[in-house]
Amino acid sequence: MFLLGYSNTIMVRELLASISPTLNFEAGQIASLPILALDRSTFAHTPEKLIQHAKNDWDSYETSWDFTSLPLLNADYRQPTLQGTYQQLRTYWRSMTQEMQRLEEENNHVFIDSYGLQGELKPEVPLKEITLTCNPHYRYGGAKNHNELEAQLQADTMAELLSYAVACMFGRYSLDKPGLVLANQGATLNDYLRQVPAPSFMPDEDNVIPLLDGEWFADDVTERFRTFLRGAFGEENYEENMAFLEQSLGKDVRKYFIKDFYSDHVKRYKKRPIYWLFASPKGTFSALIYLHRYRPDTVSVVLKYLRDFRKKLAARLDYLQQVGISTSVSQGEKTRALKEIETLKKQLLELDDYERDTLYPLATEQVALDLDDGVKVNYLKLGSALKKIVGLDAKGDE
C-alpha cells in the first residue's frame, strides 16, 4: 500500500517526467526513484480507501465480473420517481468523486511533506483526473461545459437502465436476485425459474425478442421494456418515469432501440456482444437473441417471427390497397396510403430475399455453437443473418 500510494503521487509523476521524457517507463527508471526510510504503516490507510472507491465504481457497471445490480435499482437511492432516484444517485456519485479527490490530495500531501517538497509541489488534483466512471469530467473530458456533461451522464445512465432491462428480458439478470442468473451455454427458462421461482418480471420464453419499428408483436423489445419499467418503478408514476427517460435520451424508447441500442451494446462489450441481432439487409426486420440461451433451433424461431411479421405487413398492404380505391376516404388519405404501399412492397421484397437467401438455409443447418470458442468465432458462423459488426472478422486474437 505504501508503494502504491507513493507511485500515484504528483511527486512521482514529476520525478518520472524528469528521468524519462517518453510515455513509457522501464524497470530501471522505476528502481531509480528515491524511497525514504519511513514508517510505511502510516501511509496504507488512504490508498486502501482509494482502491475501495475505485472498485465500487467499477462494479456498478455490468461489464464488471462483480456486477450484481444496477445502482438505479438500489434501495439506498430509491425515490417515488425515476427522476428523483437518479438525482439521489447523482448526489451519491458527486460525493464519492469529491471524497476520491480529497483522498488523492491527502495522499499527495503526506508524501510532499515527508520529502520536504512543500515549496515545489502542490497536492491539488483536478476533477478531470479523478478516474471514476461516475465522474463526467473524467468520463467524457473534452471541452464540454457543466450542463453538457450532466446531460451526457444522465443520458448514458438511462441507456444503462435499458441495457439492464434487456438483460432481465433474457434472464441474464433479475429484479429479484442479485448477480448473474442465466450465464451458461444452453441455459433455459426452467433454469431461471429454479433460481427465481416467483419472478416479478418474467424473462422471454423463446429467447427471441423482436426489435421492430412498430407495435407488431406483444413481446417486442419496446413493449417488454414498458412492462419492465412498471415492474421496477411501479405503475403509479409510469408515465412520468417514461417521460423523464425519453427526455434524458433525447428520443422515444422505440427509436432508441431501433437506432442506437445494438451499436451501444457492441461498444459496451468491445465488439464481443452477448446479445446478437438478426437483421434483414435494410433493417425492416430485426430480432435479438441471448447468446447463452442459443440452441441449434434458435434460428428457426427467428424464422417463425420473420414469417409472422411478413404476414402482418401483407395484411397491412391489402388494407391500404383497399383504402387507395375507396370512394369514402379523402384524397389526402389516399395519397398517404399510396406512399405507404410503395414502402411496404419494398419491405416485403426485402423480407422475401432475406428468408430465401439467408435465414431459411441457416435454419435448416441447425448450427451448433461452442461458447468456449468465443464470440468472434461463433458470430461469424451465423454469417449475414446477423447485423454486421465492423472489424469483428479482422484477424487477431480473440
Image: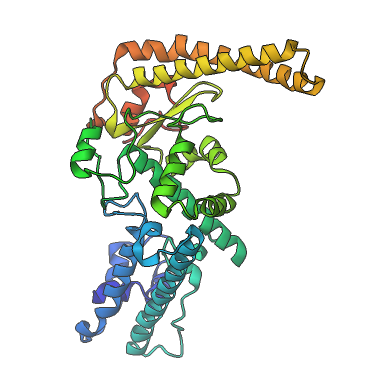
Q: Tell me the quarter of the image containing the C terminus.
A: top left
State the image coordinates of residue 351 (x, y, percent, origin top left): 52, 15
Q: In front: 360, or 6?
A: 360
User: Farthest front residue?
Assistant: 328
Image-quadrant location for residue 104: bottom left
The residue positioned 27% from the left and 70% from the top of the image is 31
Q: Is residue 266 above or below residue 285?
A: below
245 w.r.t. 386: above or below:
below
**Residue 142, visible in the rendered structure:** no
- Colour scheme in the image? rainbow
Tally of marks: 0
Residue 284 seen in the figure: yes
Q: State the quadrant of the N terminus.
A: bottom left
> Which quadrant of the view contains residue 379?
top left
Between 349 and 77, the one nearer to me in the picture: 77
Q: Position of residue 112 (x, y in %)?
A: 37, 85
Q: In x, y percent, where is residue 154?
A: 52, 58
313 left or right, relative to 200: right
Image point 34% across, 83% down: which residue?
A: 111
Percent x, y for residue 292?
Answer: 28, 34
- The residue nearer to you, when weighing 254 against 367, is 254
On the rendered structure, is 137 left or right of 60?
right
Residue displayed at 43% across by 42% down: 227
- Relative vertical location of residue 373 with respect to residue 305 in this rendering, above or below: below
- Vertical arrangement, residue 367 with respect to residue 170, above or below: above
* Residue 113: quarter of image: bottom left
Farthest residue, direction right: 331
Q: Residue at x 71, y 19 (%)?
A: 337
